[in-house]
Image: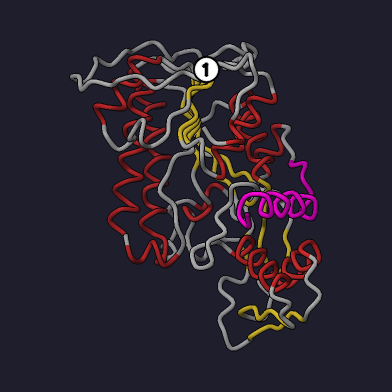
Amino acid sequence: MDRHLQKPENLSLSSSLPIQDSPPPPIMRGLNNDSSSSFSDKSSKIFVAGHRGLVGSAIVRKLISLGFTNLVLRTHSELDLTRQSKVESFFSAERPVYVILAAAKVGGIHANNTYPAEFISVNLQIQTNVIDSSFRFGVKKLLFLGSSCIYPKFAPQPIPESALLTAPLEPTNEWYAIAKIAGIKMCQAYRIQYNFNAISGMPTNLYGPHDNFHPENSHVLPALMRRFHEAKTNKAKEVVVWGTGSPLREFLHVDDLADAVVFMIENYSGLEHLNVGSGKEVTIKELAELVKEVVGFEGDLVWDSSKPDGTPRKLMDSSKLAALGWQPKVELKDGLVDTYKWYLENVTQ
């Protein structure tokens, strides 16, 4: 088990069980009619799919901090979520009460363009297997997590939930986006036809501990952090960043998302997916200057305006979640300090 998932003495993590192929179980109608979702029983069995990732690990940390003692966690080697029979056998044996679906195949533009078949097929298989088995085996509530890339390339700003399926997607990640849209619609379909309590949350750009700091495949914030750190280590005089720095972006610390996940499970049982964002925008230039300050790089920041800026603005409209009573808590600078500390302790060693 990863260091960050070491459990306190009273936490029971269900052990890996031998899983046998079995015929599909009968649909268990009528088990999910209770739309309420009391999260007060700390011994409730909760399956967090994708617990080693950026999002899943934050959710596990949050649940442990709240006193939940019966988390069901599986690595990919222990349970391949793309295998229908394995997933059904797992649910048959474990019978979780709640399911948080944070498992997904993710990657940047290069990966999406290189492996489009995997991005659509793997994600569709994971979602279909987990959502269907959750319903069949009487899960009380399921939360499916997606991404802001589900929205059209030229969606109105801020992006409301109603913008879904109103215009073409961004071509560079449409395979992943289409899979995530299918996940939303599958949750809605199972709610409509079977009254299954499945909800969906769509987070904005995330960052925090366990982010991907790969020099080629990471997103803008971890990429900047790594470049400034390496420049500081190598005593470089400058760091060159693409574009003008003018595009506006929204960032949410992954611990805030984990907090929102718990909030939605406790307070929301609707058909529509909900946006989850910070509601605050920052220019790429402001972000770069802030990361530079947090890392402690004292050289120059140079902008290569001959390179493209990308989309001018991308902000989620999270007013519906806010109206329910949820607000983010982590300020951007505090979150960057926290992320850089984790980077130093886990990536640079």
| Foreground of the two, 342 or 177 | 342
- Point 59% across, 44% down: residue: 275
| 150 left or right, relative to 130 | right
Badge 1 amino acid: Ser
Does the magenta portion include 146? Answer: no
Q: Which residue is mark 1?
A: 35
**Which secondary structure type mostly characterizes the magenta part of the structure?**
helix
**Where is residue 61 drawn, in percent x and y?**
64, 32
Measured along the vertical axis of the image, is residue 171 above or below residue 197? below
| Foreground of the two, 271 or 340 | 340
Q: Quadrant of residue 44?
A: top right
Q: Residue furthest bottom?
A: 306
Q: Residues within 10 Å of mark 1 (few under 14, many from 20)?
A: some
Q: What colour scheme does the image use?
A: secondary structure
Count the numbered circles shown: 1
**Where is residue 258 drawn, in percent x and y?**
63, 36
- Which stretch appears magenta? 328-349
